[in-house]
Amino acid sequence: MTACLQPADESNAVPPVPASLPPRQAEPEPRDFREGRAGFLHSWDMVTAVNGPGTRLTYFLAGCPLRCQYCHNPDTFCQDQAEQVWTEDLIRRVRRYRSSFLLTGGGLTLSGGEPLLQPAFAGRLLHSAHEMGVHTCLDTSGFLGALADDQMLEDIDLVLLDLKAGDEALYHQVTTQTLAPTLAFGQRLADQHKPVWIRFVLVPGLTDRPDNIRAVALRAASWPNVERVDVLPFHQMGRHKWETLDIPYQLADTPEATREQVEQAVAVFRSLGLNCPD
Ligand code: SF4
């Protein structure tokens, strides 16, 4: 159960810039995007117990290099329909909610899409939040982990790392990309003792093979910095988006994962000493 804390007069529109700020051009230029003063934003929300601990402001950054069969946000694949936003406006919103974050143990989460597709933009957001004492979280597939520089890792308190499959062949089938970059990023986070929550989506007939679940669990167990594993049941809530976007959806006939199937997968993770909250 989540609690929406979005104020009644708030919307996804970027708040107006106060008159005290220096004037700037209306539209960001390519250089602003390159240097992280602006970025492509899909949407944002403010909820509790999702995307990290406490009450969290989550910015969903637009664009993703993966094409996961089970993606429930295919409208984040591309940036051409995304809102072009100024970084300072997003930081201002973080500041506005700072006391709520401190009160609830929450903070800022960058999700997507894939936030590391815009490393300069993501880096500035994380650094500003970190500097004002707000807990920061990066929700990522890890595929572009090499684009997260050491400064960015310093500015991140928690990484939500999606492990979508346990071997290259299945990872490619699920995502169209390769697993190795995610494993390299996971190992880098382990070497730096960075807190990580692993997320694994259980898709009947795709990722639920016992050998795959065990391979994912073994990998997670090999990283001592993994604080918890969330086994997320596949659902069909994103189906209408695929249809609206007219993108072929391969899982139209796939049943949602049952509670029993999730419990069986969780048992495998727990058997290796991993923490899987109920
Ligand atoms: S990484 Fe996330 S946003 Fe990208 S395709 Fe996969 S599920 Fe969708």
Image (cartoon, helix red, strand yellow):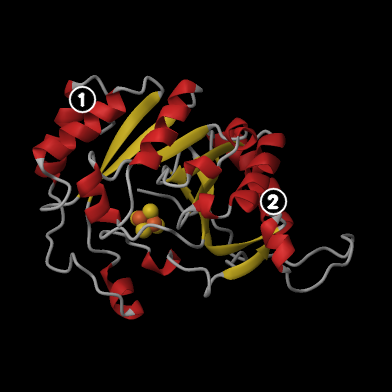
- Quadrant occupied by the C terminus: top left
Residue 28 quadrant? bottom right
Residue 241 is left or right of residue 271, and the answer is right
Residue 84 quadrant? bottom right
Circle 1 residue: 270
Whereabouts is ligand 1, in terms of quadrant?
bottom left
Q: Residue 27's x, y, as percent?
A: 74, 73
Q: Mark 1 or 2 closer to N-term?
A: 2
Q: In this view, does 106 lie above or below 177?
A: above
Q: Residue 83's x, y, as percent?
A: 59, 70
SS for callout 1: helix
Q: Residue 55's x, y, as percent?
A: 51, 43
Residue 133 is left or right of residue 64, and the answer is right
Instruction: For marks 1 and 2, give the CA distance.
Output: 39 Å
Which of the pair 207/260 is nearer the observer? 207
Residue 264 quadrant? top left
Q: Which amino acid is tagged 2?
A: Ile
Q: Which residue is drawn at 51% across and 41% down?
A: 146
Which of the pair 145/121 is nearer the observer? 145
- The reply to whether residue 97 is visible in this rendering is no
Q: Residue at x 12, y 49 (%)?
A: 258
Circle 2 residue: 91
Q: Which residue is drawn at 65% across and 34% down?
A: 151
Q: Which amino acid is tagged 1?
A: Arg
